Image: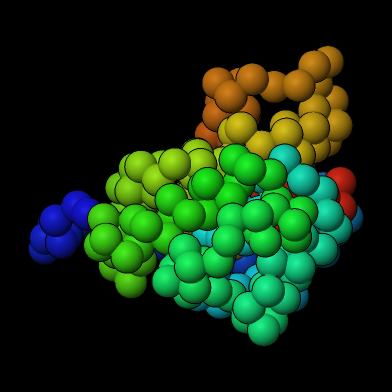
């Protein structure tokens, strides 16, 4: 884990829907029309049903990789059903037969990823209770050191669990599809093109992404 932040460390900015919407409306006429059409976002509703603890949020993110929201929710419920309906602790996850997890609908690779997360937490390599002290970039570095947690999963954790304000998930297909539709682009934007398109959204790119997902009614799990 990275050293504790010093006095000069930049304080992380939390997502503020009202302030962010004002900024997006002022800086981007396309986003202004999108916000007008969709109305205010209910962040509490978006967190409902998601694990409240960081370990559970990361497990859920692994389960949700490359799945629809409905499929991911169903599989995660079957996984937690193996543990009395609650998120398994790292110890519980490592103690269960991997084949039982596969029987809940997980691929062999996702079982390995979940076990890797549990091992990193137990060993102290990943100190989840300290993540919120770190910058977005440092959190991404810490999380992606775990097998199976890539940049996409780290971005989802930053937006939905830590509610960081300025995260643009340039690798998310839903955001790219929405940007193409909302901005009338001829093709899916590349990561570089989406980054350039989102420059006016800083420092509220997370909210812009949420509105783009909402425009397709396709929020990630």
Looking at the image, the residue that sits furthest to the left is 7
Residue positioned 65% across, 55% down in the render = 99
Residue at x 15% of width, y 61% of height: 4
- 4 or 27: nearer the viewer: 4
The answer to whether 188 appears left or right of 192 in the picture is right
Camera-side residue of 163 and 29: 163
Q: Is residue 195 left or right of residue 71?
A: left
Residue 81 lies, in percent from the top left, at 72, 76
Query: Vertical placement of 87 versus 174: above or below?
Result: below
User: Residue 113: x percent and y percent?
Assistant: 52, 47
Please give the name of the residue rendered at 52% of the width and 54% of the height, measured from the top-left corner: 114
Q: Nearer the viewer, residue 171 or 50?
A: 50
Q: In the displayed orientation, state which residue is furthest to the bottom.
A: 84
- Viewer can see residue 68: yes
Q: At which x and y percent is residue 89?
A: 48, 74
Q: How is the image coloured?
A: rainbow
Q: Quadrant of residue 189?
A: top right
Give the percent coordinates (x, y) of residue 27: 61, 43
**Quadrant of the image containing the C terminus:** bottom right
State whether residue 170 is above or below residue 221: above
Taking the spot 58% from the left edge, 61% from the top edge, the residue there is: 97
Q: Quadrant of residue 201?
A: top right
**Residue 28 is at least partly visible in this image:** no
Q: How many marks?
A: 0
Query: Where, quadrant-wise, is the N terminus in this rendering?
Result: bottom left
| Image height of 14 relative to 206, above or below | below
């Amino acid at each position: 884990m990275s050293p504790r932040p010093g006095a000069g460390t930049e304080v992380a900015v939390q997502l503020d829907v009202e302030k962010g919407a004002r900024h997006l409306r002022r800086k981007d006429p396309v986003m202004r029309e999108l916000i007008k059409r969709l109305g205010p976002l209910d962040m509490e509703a978006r967190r409902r049903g998601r694990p409240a603890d960081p370990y559970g949020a990361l497990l859920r993110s692994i389960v949700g990789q490359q799945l629809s929201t409905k499929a991911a929710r169903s599989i995660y419920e079957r996984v937690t059903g193996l543990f009395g309906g609650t998120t398994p602790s790292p110890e519980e996850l490592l103690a269960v037969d991997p084949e039982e997890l596969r029987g809940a609908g997980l691929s062999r690779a996702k079982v390995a990823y979940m076990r890797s997360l549990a091992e990193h937490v137990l060993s102290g390599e990943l100190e989840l209770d300290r993540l919120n002290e770190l910058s977005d970039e440092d959190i991404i570095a810490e999380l992606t050191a775990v097998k199976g947690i890539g940049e996409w999963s780290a971005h989802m954790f930053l937006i939905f669990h830590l509610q960081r304000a300025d995260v643009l998930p340039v690798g998310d297909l839903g955001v790219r599809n929405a940007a193409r539709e909302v901005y009338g682009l001829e093709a899916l934007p590349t990561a570089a093109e989406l980054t350039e398109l989102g420059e006016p959204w800083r420092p509220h790119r997370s909210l812009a992404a949420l509105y783009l997902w909402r425009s397709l009614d396709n929020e990630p799990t």
